[in-house]
Image: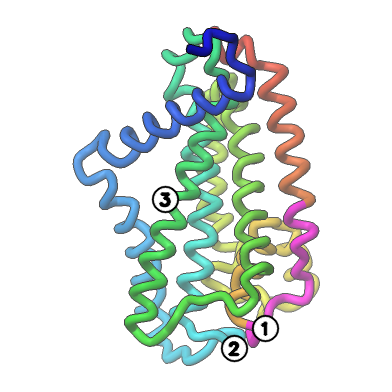
């Protein structure tokens, strides 16, 4: 029987595993039909916009089928939004766990980021199956480029969540302000309006938004015929994500004791 002390990494992985199981059960079964809402929300957005574009007789958007263009854009945005919003509230939802010294505020944020990403990816897989049955497969022609864009969106959301989780707990009104930003962010990120059709210099200003680079990158990875914006840069997306991650981790370290004592 091994009675030696566990390494810090083994303790961290044990904490993350326990938190992931706890978060998954809470997220999916805490409320009646909670798991169903995970599908209904994106289905409502995608269904409404697909019907709208069908009424407008849109046959192609930037060289892509409208259904594939809309689904890929909205699911990419949902990946960012769900990870950013849900993980931002992780600290406040797990205050009771901080009585265990092994559990740190940053652990709850990171675990929730992983869980939300898995849930969105599962939703995306379901949508891909539906589109395939419809004869509009949602498959990546450039999988590495598409995966890089998805990873960039996720890292961007993780950095956002690390920073927002601190700000929300220290200044409660801060969370309301961040929530209000999500709706205009949906509109200016190219999820519904193709950014390539917007004239310069307005398009240049909109492309300062890193989420737009991620969404355009996902679409460019899905279809090699997609006419993406010339300003598309995954290096910019990952660069902004790394900056947010740095400041997010710095804030978590700086206010760790204060978050635990809330």
Front-lying residue, 159 or 61 = 159
Disc 2 to disc 1, how far (Cα)?
Answer: 6 Å
Q: Main secondary structure of the magenta part?
A: loop
Q: CA distance from mark 1 to mark 3?
A: 29 Å
Circles 2 and 1 in contact, beta carbons < 8 Å: yes
Question: Quick one: SS at disc 2?
Answer: loop
SS at circle 3: helix
Residue 208 quadrant: bottom right
Q: How dense is the environment of label 2, judged by Cα within 10 Å: few (below 14), some, or many (20 and up)? A: some
Query: What's the residue at 34%, 84% (across, down)?
Result: 134
Name the element at disc 1.
loop
Residue at mark 2: 63
Scheme of colours in the image: rainbow
57 or 256: nearer the eye? 256
Is 199 left, or right, of 33 in this rendering?
A: right
Mark 3 lies on residue: 119
**Magenta region:** 224-238
Q: Is residue 191 magenta?
A: no
Q: Residue furthest front?
A: 1
Q: Nearer the viewer, residue 168 or 160?
A: 160
- Label 2 vs 1, first from the N-terminus: 2
Q: Looking at the picture, how far across and down is residue 15, in whole percent?
A: 50, 23
180 shown above or below 206: above
Question: Which residue is rendered at x = 63% and y = 24% of the image?
Answer: 9
Marks 3 and 1: in contact by CB < 8 Å? Answer: no
Q: CA distance from mark 3 to mark 2?
A: 29 Å
**3 or 2: tag closer to the N-terminus:** 2
The residue to which callout 1 is attached is: 227
């Amino acid at each position: 029987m091994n009675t030696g002390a566990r390494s810090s990494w083994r303790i961290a992985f044990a904490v993350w595993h326990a938190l992931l199981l706890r978060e998954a059960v809470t997220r999916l079964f805490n409320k009646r039909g909670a798991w169903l809402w995970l599908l209904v929300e994106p289905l409502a957005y995608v269904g409404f916009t697909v019907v709208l574009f069908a009424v407008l007789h849109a046959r192609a958007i930037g060289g892509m089928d409208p259904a594939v263009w809309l689904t890929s854009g909205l699911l990419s945005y949902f990946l960012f939004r769900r990870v950013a919003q849900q993980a931002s509230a992780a600290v406040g939802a797990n205050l009771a766990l901080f009585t265990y010294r092994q559990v740190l505020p940053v652990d709850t944020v990171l675990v929730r980021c992983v869980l939300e990403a898995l849930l969105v990816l599962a939703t995306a897989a379901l949508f891909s199956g539906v589109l395939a049955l419809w004869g509009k497969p949602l498959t990546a022609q450039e999988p590495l480029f598409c995966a890089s864009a998805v990873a960039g969106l996720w890292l961007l959301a993780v950095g956002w969540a690390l920073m927002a989780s601190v700000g929300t707990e220290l200044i409660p009104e801060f969370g309301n302000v961040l929530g209000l930003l999500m709706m205009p962010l949906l509109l200016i990120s190219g999820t519904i309006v193709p950014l390539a059709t917007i004239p310069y210099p307005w398009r240049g200003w909109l492309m300062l938004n890193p989420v737009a680079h991620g969404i355009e990158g996902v679409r460019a990875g899905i279809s090699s015929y997609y006419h993406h914006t010339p300003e598309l840069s995954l290096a910019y997306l990952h660069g902004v994500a790394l900056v947010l991650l740095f400041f997010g981790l710095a804030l978590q370290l700086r206010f760790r004791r204060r978050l635990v004592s809330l």
